[in-house]
Every structure is written in structure tokens, then in C-alpha cells.
């Protein structure tokens, strides 16, 4: 089969690789029909995070089950499925607790494992990891494109909102206008937030934020953004979603939090070397909650909304490519020509 | 009157200063009968934090009201009172919310203000700040010495436990065997924790931890302490109290937290420059909650227990001095000859 591989900073190539096979009785093999390129893929693409070379890429798989191991009971060949960005057994203490990202048998896609940006993947712990899309929706392209972000960014934005304690009637500030930030806005609206203030840098992305439910948008950086948010909230919001993972966005998030509030953070902390945010956090008892999103815990709930037509994050896909277009997809995201790239192998 | 002043690293002197007077109609003047030296006083004493020179010192006042301003209604001359380490109005959004440390009119004792390590203080916002000890206990020395830690360390330890989410039946790890850590152990017991593991460096302090309810103690540093705690908890505790505020103790706290758990931190972050703990926090969704303790919010509840004889943190006072003994008290705490020094001016 063919799959995208990372060969070093800025180098993605689509090449022939061996077909995946059932290696464990709990495996499935899935033919990828839809996947995506993630903002977090840019970290290794830009040389800012270690990654195997050559290494398989992509961690947002959706497709059709080709083959299952002898112990797999939840899915069968022909089923349309999606999988969270993290592989999980579904049975351990942490999976039962809804913290699948801390699964004792957990693993990530890509690297040495098969990646989602390819024709097929081997899915370990298929019963725990794969989520079946009911047959009646299995070929509805609109449903599939709305469901695909549940593999990562939509559930990640939701995790930020849940971690920040957003509930009906609340005021929330969302820091970041990338795909996760936009999904965070959508999650806040879904949870009933009355006021949603989106902070970002890009007018076009903030337009999507408005479409997703932002009641106010601020296109500014640093102190200017902080001042605007403090002004809009009369001194800070009780609920802040940090959806970037940079030192500056972390600082901003704490600066716009109201004393006693909570920052829900989901951006992989990259380059957050200094703990300057702790000074604000400590003095005003602002809680830092969140972390890597336990997507599997949220998929059923959010998929219900996708299936009933009340949740559609697909406008974050501003470009679509086929498998051969994956290198171009990385380039487009790296150069901010696209918010998020949909890949249809 | 006479009061202790800070003159620079390692220099505390007791000198004549002007008597405090009523400056605002909401002020009271309190004659100090009991106060203490705090572990956080050592930061400026050791030159590790900026502090005015000369500057008044002491932030744990207990005494008898001498005089009140015309608008003070909650206390009157002759009342025995104590005050939290932070001055608060008692009326603003944050005071009403139980977050008195973010009071919009809040202030700290000492520095330019009068300090508790002296014969008298001027207490601003007396109605909001001062807590009356009922007359029937007002001259009971045992009660007063048990109540004095409510001005800071006992409520701070309690805040760590509350922030870490400790409830009946829980397992908690307490990082730090200073006065706050020991009070944290006591708070965990009071909240009904079934297993309380105290991590420290000093056998004598860990003995007090046992007296306060620790079911297990670990006298070790770094990886050795982490390994022991992980072993005792089969992989980490859901509730961790960080009672030091150093970079190493912060790292330890996150390392001994169970995935999905919470670290309640109350040690003023001093020298926590690097955000290395974020990696653990993010990967395992460990929440960081807490901050500077809103003592005023907890005093009533904890004072009830002191008055009924079920809470007594006074064993943390391992040395008693008069006002002239304050410089020696600092020396003793600096050199770890005393856990916490009681001052009776």
C-alpha cells in the first residue's frame, strides 16, 4: 500500500510500504477513507519535536474495517469506523475512568506504528479504540466529514471547555484560533455558554469562530489582547480555554482568567519552559486543568450530536487533498494557507 | 511601641517605632498577644525575595482590640481577635466568593504596613479582617495557641487539601514536612482521608506528621521519595498536597499524582522557573489547583473545631520567644532548629 512518511524537517513523501496485517488477535485492519493533517503534526514537520525518520504520520483515522483478529467482537469487516488519536484498551482503570489517554496499554498512531495518512492502518485494541458509525450514516459524506474531527480536534476543544468548567450561562474566553480553538468555541456553545470571547490573530479564522458561536472576537496579540478581554469581561472570565500550547498563550490565558477561575488547557505544551504563568495562577487561585484530551471518553456523546445534525465542526476543513496531496497539505498548514486539511486517500 | 524590623539579609532587629493609630474609620488597633514566624518570612530573610528595608515583619496576628474606628461594628475594645495573613474587606465579589486573597481592597501585613511581630498593629478593614474569639475562650492559653495557626499555616494546609479534592476515604500524598505540610496532614485527617502519606526530609518532623494522622511517612528526596510514594499507592495518589513551593517539590508532587488526579499547591512558588511539571501534568491530565490560601474563608469552620477541642495544630510550635527573641526565632527557623516559632510579645 502507499502511505505518507516523514523524512525530516519539512519533508513528507508518499511511498510504498508493506500492507498492515493482523498481528494480535485484538487487532483490526482498516482501509482509510478520510483522515486529516493536525496542527500538532506541524511540530515535528517544523523540527520542533523529535519524531522517527522515516516515520509514519497521521493520527486521525476514519475508514472501513477490512479484517479483524479472532478476539475482536465490537466491529466487523465492512463497518465504517473512526478512531481517536490515542489507542486504548477500553478495559483498564483509566479507560473505565474516562481517561483513555492514560490507558495502561495505550499507544499513539504513527512513528513506528502505522499512521492514518496512508491507505490502511493496523488498529491495535480494536474493541477499545474503534468507534463504529451506524450503517444508516456510514456513506453519508456530510456526516462523515462532520464526524472526522471527533478523532482529535473537536474532542480536544471539548476537553478544554469541560476542563475549564464551562456550563450553561457562563462566560468563556477561548485563546487560539486554530482548529482546536475554533472547536473550543463550538464546544462552549454546545455546553450553553452565554458569552464566548475568541482571541486570535486571523480575521478569517475569527469569522469561523463567530459562525461557531463566538459572541465577541479579538484580533490582537499579547497585552492588547489581554486588555481587550479584561475589558469585555470586566476583569476576567471564570472559564478560559487555552488551545495553543505556547508560552505566550499560556500567559495570556492566565492573565484573562478571573480570580478563582479555571484555565482548561489542551495545547501540547511546546516551548513552555518558564513557569511565569504560575505567579498569576498562585496569587489569584486560578486552576490549571486539562491536558491531552481523552477523546474516546467524549466520542459517543459528541457523535450523537453529529448524527442528529446539531454539531458540525467540518468548516475547519478549508482544504481537501488526496493521499498524493498530503505533502502539499502540510505545506498549506505550515504556511497558514489552510486551517485544517482533510485527506481522502 | 516596639516592633521587629527587617534590615536586610539575615538582619532582624527589635526597635522603637511610632504607635499605630486609627487612620480610617474602618481601622482597629490591636495589641498583639500572640504571633508567629512563618516559613515564608525566611524568603526575604534569606535574601530570596524583595522586601522593604527597613520593613515591618510578621503576618500572623492575634491579640486584644485596643481601639476601633467609628465605622467598625464587628469587634470592640477588649475583644480577643486573630487575623488572617491577608487583609480583606469582607464585602467585595471575591470576599463573598470565599476568595479573600483576591479582595479588591486587600493588602498584606508588614513592609510599609504594621507587622504582627510587634506590640501593636493597625488593622485596616477591621470588620472584614478580624475574627473574634468568643469571650469564654478568650483567655484559655491552650485554645489561643491552637487557634493561632489559623492565621496562616493551618488554613494554608487546609487549602492544599481542599484544592487537591481530599474527601472521606481518599488517599492523599503530602509533599513537605514544614509547618504547612504538617497542617496539610492534619487537614487531610480532618477531611476523612483514609490514607495519608507524608513525604519529607526530617525524622522529627515526620514524627509530628504521624501524630497528626499520617499513615505512612517517607524520609527521602527526589526519585527515592517518588518511587516510595508510587509503591505505596500502586502508581500514584489522586490527591497530592504540594506544601513547599520549590521547583523540586512541584516536580515531585506531579510525579506522585495518579493520572487524572489533582495537585493542590499552596507553597508560594519560589524559584519554580521551569515548567517541567507541565509535561507530567499534560500527559496524565493532572490538575493544578490552589494558590495563596484564602484563610478568612476557612477560619470560622476550623475555629469551630479548635473550640470544640478536635483540632490542635499547636505542636508545630517547637520554640517560643518574646518580642526580643524574634531575631533568635528567625535564626532558629533558618537553621531548622525550630519548625515554627511562637512569639508572645
Image (cartoon, coloured by chain):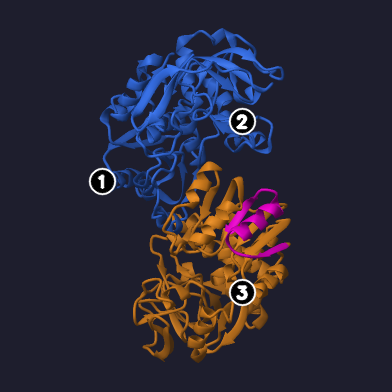
Chain colours: A orange, B blue
- Secondary structure of residue under mark 1: helix
The earlier-in-sequence mark between 1 and 2 is: 2
Q: Residues within 10 Å of mark 2 (few under 14, many from 20)?
A: many
Q: Are marks 1 and 2 in contact (CB under 8 Å)?
A: no
- The answer to whether B304 appears left or right of B215 in the picture is right
The quadrant the N terminus of chain A occupies is: bottom left
Mark 1–mark 2 distance (CA, rounded to whole Å)? 42 Å
What chain letter is assigned to the residue under label 1?
B
- Secondary structure of residue under mark 3: helix
| Residue A227, position as x, y percentages in the image | 64, 55
Q: Which residue is mark 1?
A: B224
Mark 3–mark 2 distance (CA, rounded to whole Å)? 50 Å
Q: Residues within 10 Å of mark 3 (few under 14, many from 20)?
A: many
Which portion, as a residue range, is magenta?
A216-241
Q: Which residue is mark 2?
A: B88
Q: Do callouts 3 and 2 point to residues on the same chain? A: no
Q: Do callouts 1 and 2 point to residues on the same chain? A: yes
Taking A174 as reference, is A15 above or below it?
below
Q: Are marks 3 and 1 in contact (CB under 8 Å)?
A: no
User: Residue B300 — which label?
Assistant: none
Q: Which residue is mark 3?
A: A147
Task: Look at 67% across and 80% down and name the residue there.
Answer: A142
- Secondary structure of residue under mark 2: loop
| Residue A308, position as x, y percentages in the image | 71, 70
Could you say which is closer to the camera, residue B20 or residue A140? B20
Taking A189 as reference, is A325 above or below it?
below
Taking A163 as reference, is B57 above or below it?
above
Q: Do callouts 3 and 1 point to residues on the same chain? A: no
- The answer to whether A104 appears left or right of A203 in the picture is left
Could you say which is closer to the camera, residue A345 or residue A277? A277
Mark 3–mark 1 distance (CA, rounded to whole Å)? 46 Å
Mark nearest the camera among 3 and 1 is 1
Amino acid at each position: 500500500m502507499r502511505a505518507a512518511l516523514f523524512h525530516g524537517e519539512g519533508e513528507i513523501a508518499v511511498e510504498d510500504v508493506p500492507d498492515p496485517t493482523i498481528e494480535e488477535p485484538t487487532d483490526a485492519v482498516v482501509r482509510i477513507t478520510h483522515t486529516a493533517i493536525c496542527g500538532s503534526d506541524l511540530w515535528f514537520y517544523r523540527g520542533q519535536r523529535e519524531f522517527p525518520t522515516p516515520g509514519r504520520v497521521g493520527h486521525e483515522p476514519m475508514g472501513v474495517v477490512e479484517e479483524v483478529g479472532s478476539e475482536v467482537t465490537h466491529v466487523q469487516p465492512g463497518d465504517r469506523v473512526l478512531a481517536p488519536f490515542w489507542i486504548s484498551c477500553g478495559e483498564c482503570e483509566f479507560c473505565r475512568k474516562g481517561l483513555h489517554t492514560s490507558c495502561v496499554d495505550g499507544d499513539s498512531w504513527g512513528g513506528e506504528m502505522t499512521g492514518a495518512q496512508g491507505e490502511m492502518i493496523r488498529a491495535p485494541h480494536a474493541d477499545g479504540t474503534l468507534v463504529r458509525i451506524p450503517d444508516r450514516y456510514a456513506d453519508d459524506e456530510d456526516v462523515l466529514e462532520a464526524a472526522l474531527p471527533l478523532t482529535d480536534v473537536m474532542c480536544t476543544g471539548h476537553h478544554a471547555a469541560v476542563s475549564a468548567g464551562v456550563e450553561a450561562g457562563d462566560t468563556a474566553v477561548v485563546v487560539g484560533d486554530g482548529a482546536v480553538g475554533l472547536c473550543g468555541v463550538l464546544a462552549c456553545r454546545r455546553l450553553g455558554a452565554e458569552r464566548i470571547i475568541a482571541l486570535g490573530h486571523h480575521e478569517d479564522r475569527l469569522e469561523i469562530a463567530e459562525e461557531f458561536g463566538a459572541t465577541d472576537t479579538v484580533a490582537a496579540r499579547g497585552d492588547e489582547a489581554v486588555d481587550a478581554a479584561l475589558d469585555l469581561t470586566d476583569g476576567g472570565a471564570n472559564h478560559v480555554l487555552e488551545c495553543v500550547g505556547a508560552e505566550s498563550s499560556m500567559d495570556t490565558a492566565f492573565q484573562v482568567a478571573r480570580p478563582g477561575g479555571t484555565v482548561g488547557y489542551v495545547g501540547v505544551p511546546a516551548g513552555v519552559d518558564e513557569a511565569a504563568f504560575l505567579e498569576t495562577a498562585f496569587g489569584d487561585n486560578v486552576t490549571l486543568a486539562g491536558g491531552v484530551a481523552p477523546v474516546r471518553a467524549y466520542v459517543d456523546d459528541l457523535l450523537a450530536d453529529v448524527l442528529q445534525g446539531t454539531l458540525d465542526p467540518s468548516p475547519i476543513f478549508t482544504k481537501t487533498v488526496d493521499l498524493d496531496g498530503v505533502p502539499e497539505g502540510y505545506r498549506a498548514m505550515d504556511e497558514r494557507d489552510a486551517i485544517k486539511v482533510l485527506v481522502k486517500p
